[in-house]
Image (cartoon, helix red, strand yellow):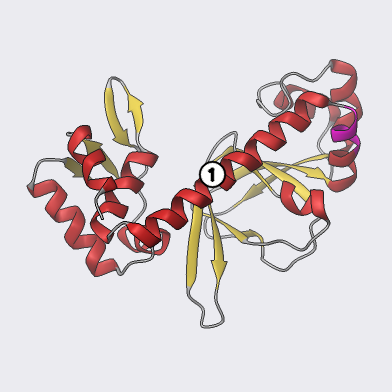
């Protein structure tokens, strides 16, 4: 069921993707918006499916992955509040290129394909946000390819932790560090190797791991290790 127009209007104003929209445009967009909730470990979309909507994460986290024929998966990225996905297929009319699964309960906005296309052609700022997002993902893909080709597992773990780190109350940390198995799938390594690297980084005093949080204690050394082949 589409969300109530007033509710959509209120929520959209808090989302950077739509925050610059006029009230008139938001009112036009509202009937094309649905507010949806998903439990943990739910697939929002699957690779190969028809592309029919763009999704904006309001709360919770998801992982973007590509499964292989043997049931294994490669994790392309993690996403959280204010991130969006699904725009690629809407632009080129191709099936979904990857699957998206929730890591925790999530609330999302679903913008239909028709609403997205109509909105895109009438709003230059939205077009630029979409373009910048696509360019950022292309740069991330280039960086990941470089890492897989040129950097050892130790460096890949260090680089991933640095990329995910945020400044929280003056401390550089990864507030929601993925489990070691997830890290392994993100960097193309085994869980055992990731565990060894994380343990060694802690012994050397470069990081401190506390439950699901990882504190970066020595950023210069971590950065140097992330570049080493």
- Taking 135 as reference, is 126 left or right? right
Main SS of the magenta part reads helix
- Taking 114 as reference, is 102 left or right? left
- Taking 90 as reference, is 194 left or right? left
At x 91% / y 36%, what residue is drawn? 118
- Tell me the element at label 1: helix
At x 20% / y 33%, what residue is drawn? 220
Residue 95 in percent (x, y) is at 76, 63
For disc 1, the neighbor class at 10 Å (few under 14, some 14 to 19, many from 20) is few
Residue 4 in percent (x, y) is at 83, 32
In front: 62, or 195?
Answer: 195
Relative vertical location of residue 74 with respect to residue 201 in this rendering, above or below:
below
Relative vertical location of residue 12 with respect to residue 188 in this rendering, above or below:
above
In front: 101, or 225?
Answer: 225
Q: Choose top left, top right, bottom left or bottom right for residue 15.
A: top right
Relative vertical location of residue 152 with respect to residue 34 in this rendering, above or below:
below
Q: Answer whether residue 44 is magenta in the image.
A: no
- The stretch of residues the image draws in magenta is 118-122
At x 53% / y 40%, what residue is drawn? 80
Q: Which residue is mark 1?
A: 139
Residue 7 shows in the view: no
């Amino acid at each position: 069921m589409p969300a109530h127009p007033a509710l959509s209007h209120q929520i959209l104003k808090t989302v950077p993707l739509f925050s610059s929209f006029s009230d008139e445009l938001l009112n036009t967009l509202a009937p094309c918006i649905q507010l949806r909730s998903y439990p943990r470990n739910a697939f929002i979309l699957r690779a190969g499916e028809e592309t029919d909507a763009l999704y904006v994460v309001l709360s919770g986290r998801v992982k973007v992955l590509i499964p292989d024929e043997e049931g294994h998966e490669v994790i392309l990225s993690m996403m959280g509040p204010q991130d969006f996905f699904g725009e690629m297929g809407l632009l080129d009319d191709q099936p979904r290129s990857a699957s998206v699964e929730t890591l925790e309960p999530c609330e999302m906005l679903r913008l239909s394909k028709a609403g997205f296309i109509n909105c895109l052609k009438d709003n230059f700022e939205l077009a630029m946000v979409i373009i910048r997002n696509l360019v950022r993902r292309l740069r991330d893909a280039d960086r990941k390819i470089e890492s897989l080709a040129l950097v050892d597992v130790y460096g890949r773990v260090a680089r991933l932790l640095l990329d995910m780190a945020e400044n929280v109350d003056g401390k550089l940390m990864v507030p929601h560090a993925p489990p070691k198995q997830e890290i392994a799938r993100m960097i193309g390594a085994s869980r055992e190797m990731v565990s060894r690297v994380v343990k060694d980084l802690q012994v050397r005093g470069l990081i401190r791991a506390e439950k699901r949080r990882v504190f970066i204690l020595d950023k210069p050394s971590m950065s140097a290790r992330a570049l080493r082949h």
